[in-house]
Image (cartoon, grey):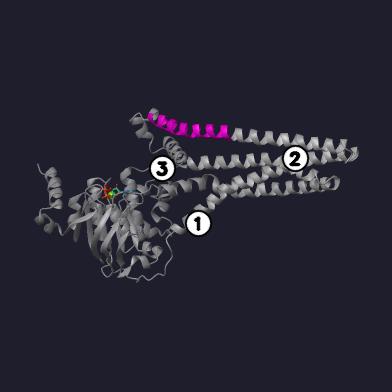
Amino acid sequence: MDDADFYDAMQRARSRGARGAAMVVDAGVGLLAAAAGIVAAAGTLAVLHPILLPLLLVSVLPAGWAAAHSARMQYQVIYMLSTSMRRQWILSDLMADRRPAAEIRAFGMRDFLLQQYDDVARVSENAHIGLAGRQALARITGEATSGIVGGLVYAALCVLLATGVVPLAIAGGAILAIRMGRSSLSELIRAANGVYDEGLYFSDYLDFCEEAERRRSQRRPDLLAPQFAGIELREVSFAYPGADRTALRNISLTIGKGEVIALVGENGSGKTTLAKIIAGLYEPDSGTILWDGTSLARLDPGAVRQKIAMIPQDHTPWPLTARQNIAAGADADDDAMISAAELAGIHRTIQELPEGYDTLLDPRFKAGHELSGGQWQRVAAARAFYRRAPLLLCDEPTSALDPRAEHAFFEAVRHSAHADPTDPQTVVLITHRLTSVLMADKIYVLSEGCLAESGTHTELLQAGGIYAALFKLQAEAYTP
Ligand SMILES: Nc1ncnc2c1ncn2[C@@H]1O[C@H](COP(=O)(O)OP(=O)(O)OP(=O)(O)O)[C@@H](O)[C@H]1O
Ligand SMILES: [Mg+2]
């Protein structure tokens, strides 16, 4: 999802690809029908006089070439315009969507966005106008040549008639057969073009499916022990596809079972990327990640993800009911759901909704209900708590929460982590609220993708590095 080329291919596949299969079949049936007509006409002509048959074929070929050439040019233009058409879609979706509406109005962005849309649309319009011109030229050339050759066929027939090679009755029959043959040949060419044209899109679609299949994480044997024991990263480096700088460089760290570790650092320092690497959502370019002592590369990704609960920085407000939002596709167990929602501080809010846990959380639909930003973040937390996974990754879990809710959240994490003393939960916490990282057993400080410092809060304060500077800055803001 981070690769622009993949997005372009996916757009082409979504817009025309799958539909192409039905079109290819339709055109294929037309092709067979036209072929039957030609066989009939060709048989008649061959019986009447053998020279008439090649003449008939020659008269239709130029038009056939023109149609195939025109389809090819159209495919090339659509291929070339993939990116700009995707941009056009994105812009039009944004302008017609509910979430950006307030910002568009508040910043008066309407005309600007329309202008952006027009600019992109103009590129596409110009390309299509150019294409139409080239297509018209190819068609005119093809049809005109076919017409001239058709005239020659009739002239040849006249010559044959005049020289007495064929009698009048046969010439009359030949004219009918030629007309029928020409119309069947045109139909055949049209259908063959359809197969070719739609076949281009369909084969593009098949290529995309193959590429998507190649990119799917491979199923591997599930070698994970039932009890999570810890994670070790050794010299892990990672760059996003197409990015010119590495997002993470030579990161080595260990996370023991039941530990609470905190990742801190400035914006863009690589915290979210590191959390996603730990969760196995990205594969590192170099280095190893060991889960319970086994390299992540040897483990089944699905089995690893089963052991992770995540509160992502950019959580999704799913247009589903509150229950479905929390269960996230898992079986809904009411008691577990209520306790997860209570831990996340969202149970009362959901209970007070018109349909309780069955209320649809999307105001774009009748009886749909909207939550506030902080309430959505609590739903995201409830989703993670409900999963009861041995590893909990929290990426800025309290960025939208009020102070009381934030305090309650960290209490909840502490409670959730130690709910079962024999099997404590491991927590990776990413936050800019440095007072909240005091609860961490170990703090890792990232800077420009590198691990700059690590230690406990006290050790890092004594070291007087980045962490100490950031902490002092925040502490001063709260000291009168
Ligand atoms: N999908 C992506 N594709 C390309 N580059 C990315 C992508 N996501 C992040 N980056 C880049 O990787 C670097 C690290 O980003 P990351 O999101 O890990 O930072 P972060 O420490 O979580 O920042 P923040 O505190 O703002 O959440 C940044 O320079 C960012 O521009
Ligand atoms: Mg982040």
**Residue 264 appears left or right of 112:** left
Rendering quarter of residue 337: bottom left
In this figure, which residue is indicated by the disc labeled 1?
210
Q: Which of these two is toward me, 296 or 123?
A: 123
Compared to residue 64, the image places residue 339 above or below, namely: below
User: Mark 2 belongs to which amino acid?
Assistant: Ser
Examine the structure image and report whether residue 51 is included in the region drawn in magenta. Answer: no
Residue 176 visible, this angle? yes
In this figure, which residue is indicated by the disc labeled 3?
369
Q: Position of residue 210 (x, y in %)?
A: 50, 56
Distance in Å between CA atoms under marks 2 and 3 = 61 Å
Q: Which residues are magenta?
A: 112-134
Q: Which of these two is toward me, 338 or 57?
A: 57
For label 1, being within 8 Å of ligand 1 is answered: no
Q: Nearer the viewer, mark 1 or mark 2?
A: 2
Residue 186 visible, this angle? no
Q: Position of residue 460 (x, y in %)?
A: 13, 56
In this figure, which residue is indicated by the disc labeled 2?
183
| Secondary-structure class at tag 1 | helix
Q: Which of these two is toward me, 458 or 389?
A: 458
- Give the residue furthest to the front: 163
**How would you classify the magenta stretch by its main secondary structure?**
helix
Q: Position of residue 248 (x, y in %)?
A: 27, 55
N-term mark: 1 or 3: 1
